[in-house]
Image (cartoon, rainbow, N blue to C red):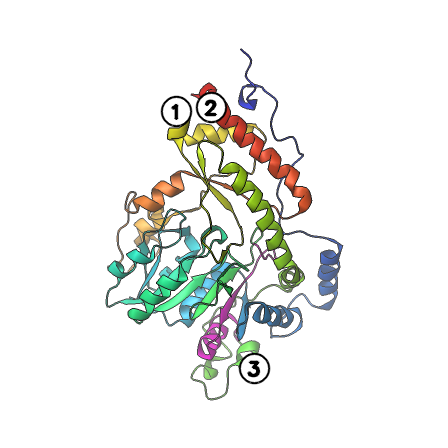
Amino acid sequence: MTSTLAVFGGKPAVTADGPHFTWPPIDDTTHARVAAQLDEAISIPGRSGVVAELEDSLQEYFGVRHAITTSSGTAALHATYWAARIKPGHEVIVPAWTFHATASPLFHLGAVPVLCETGPDGNIDPNRIEELITPRTRAVMVTHLWGKPADMTDIVAVANAHDLVVLEDGSHAHGASIAGQKVGTFGLASAFSLNGPKPLSGGEGGFVLTDDDDTYHRVITLAHYNKRAKTEIPEGHPLARYAVTGAGLKLRIHPLAAAIAHDQLPRLDGYLAGRAEIARYLTGQLARVPGLEVAELPEGVVSSWYGLTLTYRPGELGGLPIERFHQALIAEGGTEFDRPGSTCPMNQLPLYQQPGMLFPGHPRSHRRYKAGDFPVAERAHASVIKLPVWHREQDLELAEQYVRAAVKISDHHKELL
């Protein structure tokens, strides 16, 4: 019998030409702004030009007093921790499942990342934070994984009860919100990435948000020595005398990246509205497919839909392994069906198992993590399949083809056993 499955030679369900997802959307306006920036300046050492324009726009969009651009999201996280006065020996509670840069800057500060179990969605479990608090704990860092906001009400309540600083990694979640309050505005400070596929992109770059003046001055000291530090750190501030050197690092955003991000920011809410429409279609359709489970968003929670995650249930398909299911999806032309790799439970990474090789003398209080330490996060990661979420009305036809691919594999799963 000839199979209809593409993995066995059948016609693929997804027939659209690739690539099926590119980001950010670049048009003639974007090209013009980048070209104009090339003519204006390709280095901006102070807070002026497109860098100032982008920071002002970010402050207005998020409703915060300070936005400071950086060279990457990782740099923004590093600056956030330093500005929050995280010091050698301090412990910071972080979600076990996130991109490693959420926590890896802590090693450079001599601090200890303490991994916390997550819910099945990958966001930190507020009910597991308290058991990890010690006299050395100083902060809780929250990731809003795949653009879905974490439970900030309970997280902030636990942190406040123990006098801990709340920090946010919003790198997946630009424009996401809880009850109308934007992600990145719940704690002392937040860090965002502007890396290629992020909801708001400059190709590369990042930024820090805060309402706290001292935190702002400390971010400037770490990331923007000399001109910005001399201009923006007030005379008489303890850090003012270090303005020329700062902390010895330069973490500035490139003006061309700033120009791209500044071009994209006014479009962001439109992108998010379009993604929400496509996500509504995808979740409604894929939730009906045996073998796949889609979680609903809680009331009042708005995702940025950086990714739409599907939980694979092999028991509904005769025990078909996820690897075989995923392979069949790719064969059907659904090349954007992804199994996350580097964004994974960090206890599985050598850096969090044996940091001493890269950071000799790292505090002995560091827990020696191993596979199996975080069963909820590890099971969820092992069973997740992720899709990007398109944003244009004309993308609906492509989304329909991806749904057909999933339905086809589910319907014909016995041929794969």
Give how far apart the Cα atoms at labels 1 and 3 are.
66 Å
Can residue 384 be seen by looking at this rendering? yes
Q: Is residue 157 magenta?
A: no
> Residue 42 lies in what quarter of the image?
bottom right
Residue type, numbered disc 3 = Thr
Compared to residue 57, the image places residue 213 above or below, namely: below
- Relative horizontal placement of residue 292, taking residue 160 as reference (left or right): right
Does residue 362 appear left or right of residue 28 in this picture? Answer: left
- Say whether marks 2 and 3 touch (CB < 8 Å): no
Helix, strand or loop status at disc 3: helix
- Classed neighbour count for the residue bearing mark 3: other residues with Cα under 10 Å, few (<14), some (14–19), many (≥20): few
Q: x%, y% of residue 243?
A: 50, 80
Q: Nearer the viewer, mark 2 or mark 3?
A: 2
Separation of disc 1 and disc 2 at Cα? 8 Å
Q: Is residue 204 magenta?
A: yes
Q: Label 2's element?
A: helix
The amino acid type, in three-letter code, at marker 2 is: His
Mark 2 lies on residue: 413
Tag 1 near tag 2, CB within 8 Å: yes
Report the magenta residues as a range: 199-225
Look at label 1 and name its amino acid. Answer: Gly
